Amino acid sequence: MFKSLFNRVLNRAGSKISDAYSVFTRDFDAVVDAPRLNEVLAPLSPDDATALDDAWKTFETSLNSWRTTANLQALETTGLIRNAISDHERQDTVVSILVDHSGSMRGQSILLAAATAEIACDFLSRLGCRVEILGFTTLDWKGGKSRRLWRRQGSPRYPGRLCDLLHIVYRSANERGAPALGYVLKNMLRRDLLKENIDGEALEWAASRLYRRPEKRKILIILSDGAPVDDSTLHENGPNFLIDHLRGVIARLEADDRILLAAIGINWDTDGLYKRNLRVTAPEDLAGVMIDMLRNVLIESGSRITSE
């Protein structure tokens, strides 16, 4: 599909590759706490409601062996991190985990991403770190209200990002104590939630939240299964519009000493994009890879600050 889109766009008369990222309108973008998703999404259809209940039942009752393995790895890793990083350093650390909510994540990938977020949150909280769990998608398919407004205004050429963003907060770093994700994560399993993915702006949003935090050590980990895609945007701006913006955002964040950026790719090789990255070839390995990544970045963050 993406290759077909690439060829279709390049063959359009006067088509170009946009040199600079732009946004047609932000008027329809939304940032919501997960329990308030019903306020911005349409009511669940009977089929989607049944699918959500089934997915939640699986989340609660069918991952016990998987969770046990992940928790044992987390317990072992906790000792390594406690030996490498002082209590004060860990308490002066905030970690944001940003989860891709694209349509291709539907099924096992999003189920295990939610469970991995829960395990990571518990792991980090026990170490004394602050934690954020965030998600990103779009409110609708085919550009939503942004595209309809663009059409009413005469469909100007090269409009920039042409869709309605939806950014979701499952847990804020302001929350203290042991994680209380639990039922909040059920929202991540909604079939109607997973749509398009604008990774560059999602990273900027997550980073902006970290910049406002008082902790000295700031870590941002994105979990994604593919390059940014929004058909409405790419059709009007060229096939590289979103990936080029993502590359630029990554370059800026990796050059900024205030944040340590890392990525986990699910069946997606992120090595060409992110300096710090790991790949998961099977979703069931996600929790173990997340624990490995957290160990790596926590120890690197501690040593980097110490050397300054």
Image (cartoon, rainbow, N blue to C red):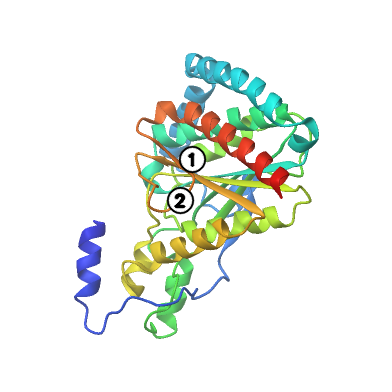
In the picture of the structure, the residue carrying the numbered disc 2 is 274
Give neighbour class at mark 2: few <14, some 14-19, many 20+ (Cα, 10 Å).
Answer: some
Q: Is residue 135 above or below residue 257?
A: above
Please tell me in which quadrant of the rendered image residue 7 appears: bottom left
Please tell me in which quadrant of the rendered image residue 73 appears: top right
- The image quadrant where one finds the N terminus is bottom left
Dot 1 or dot 2: first in sequence order is: 1
Q: Amino acid at mark 2?
A: Tyr
SS at circle 1: loop
Nearer to the camera, 160 or 75: 75
Give neighbour class at mark 1: few <14, some 14-19, many 20+ (Cα, 10 Å).
Answer: many
| Residue 245 in the image, given as x and y percentages of width and height | 45, 66
In the picture of the structure, the residue carrying the numbered disc 1 is 190
Q: Which residue does the image show at 51% across and 16% down from the upper left? A: 69
Q: Amino acid at mark 1?
A: Arg
SS at circle 2: loop
Q: Is residue 149 above or below residue 219?
A: below
Is residue 179 among what the camera can see? Answer: no
Nearer to the camera, 213 or 30: 213
State the CA–CA distance, disc 1 to disc 2. 29 Å
Left or right: residue 257 compared with residue 229: right
Nearer to the camera, 95 or 27: 95
| Residue 75 in the image, given as x and y percentages of width and height | 62, 18
